[in-house]
Amino acid sequence: PARPEARPGTAAVGPEAPGAAGSRDFEWLLDARESWVPVLTTDTRALEDDELENLSTQHVVQRRHLRFARDPLAPEGRPGDRFRIRLRVAGRWRMVDWTKLLDDAAVDQPADVCDFRYALVGSWDWSKEVELLPSGSPSEGVYAAEVTLPQEGTHQFLIVQNDDWDRAFYPMPSEFGWAAEDGVLGPDDRGQDLFWTLTGRAGETFRVEFVRRLEHGLEMRSVTWQSQMAR
């Protein structure tokens, strides 16, 4: 491929000798880990009578929400699964794709999002994870932890899944226009230099909540925090 970590359906270039300058660090990535993609949904509701007093023609309000769904182009896999990789050639056009070979007798279902463990890692001590514990019923998908800032200032943090830094959750870049608590990306290793931040005084404790649950096939996510001194 012409870029690193190319996905199925990416054009193929070459042929070149392995390790040649033009091909170095460019490869296809068959990533069989669970993957999610952002989906924009819109909720519509009628305005209440008191909201209509100052309006003449508008009778509904639409709210945008960022949700996540399993990526259909990223087949999940487990040790022992087989994939068929194909180089398609049509004249001078070439591309590579792959599909998972399914066992008709038993097709594994994707793991539910509540089957994972989550932890905070932050600049207060990058070497120490703070486990996010379930809060409420499993169906609510709420995980919470408290962290105490060791010194005054701004501290960065992100969330890792199953102690794996390559399965990290991080905020969507601000240029996308989403609120920090709603724009949750991952889990993957593509969030370099993207962190949430806690700003406070030395000894100040924050409660951080991570929400991740499925609703009608879409994944809802959010990250929020609150200083316990403000309560």
Image (tube, rainbow, N blue to C red):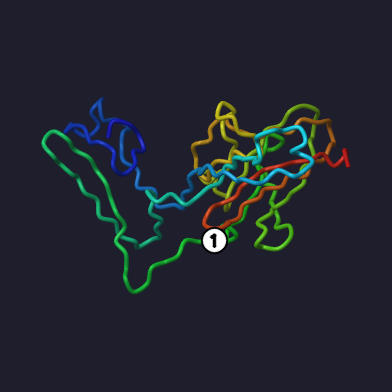
Q: Residue at x 72, y 33 (%)?
A: 55
User: From this viewpoint, which residue is outermost toward the bottom?
Assistant: 105
The x, y position of residue 226, in whole percent, is: 79, 40
Identify the image quadrant of residue 56. Answer: top right
Q: Nearer the viewer, residue 115 or 68?
A: 68
The x, y position of residue 11, in whole percent, is: 25, 36
Residue tagged by mark 1?
A: 112
Q: Residue at x 69, y 51 (%)?
A: 131
Seen in the picture, residue 77 relative to 22 is either above or below; the reply is below
Q: Residues within 10 Å of mark 1 (few under 14, many from 20)?
A: few
- Left or right of 126 in this view: 104: left
Q: Residue at x 80, y 31 (%)?
A: 200
Seen in the picture, residue 17 relative to 72 is either above or below; the reply is above
Screen quadrant of the N terminus? top left
Seen in the picture, residue 136 relative to 127 is either above or below; the reply is below
Identify the image quadrant of residue 176. Answer: top right
User: From this viewpoint, which residue is outermost toward the left?
Assistant: 91
Identify the image quadrant of residue 26. Answer: top left
Q: Amino acid at mark 1?
A: Asp
Screen quadrant of the C terminus? top right
Q: Secondary structure at mark 1?
A: loop
Q: Residue at x 32, y 68 (%)?
A: 103
How many numbered marks does the figure carry?
1
Q: Nearer the viewer, residue 64 or 143?
A: 64
The x, y position of residue 53, in whole percent, is: 77, 36
The x, y position of residue 21, in whole percent, is: 26, 25
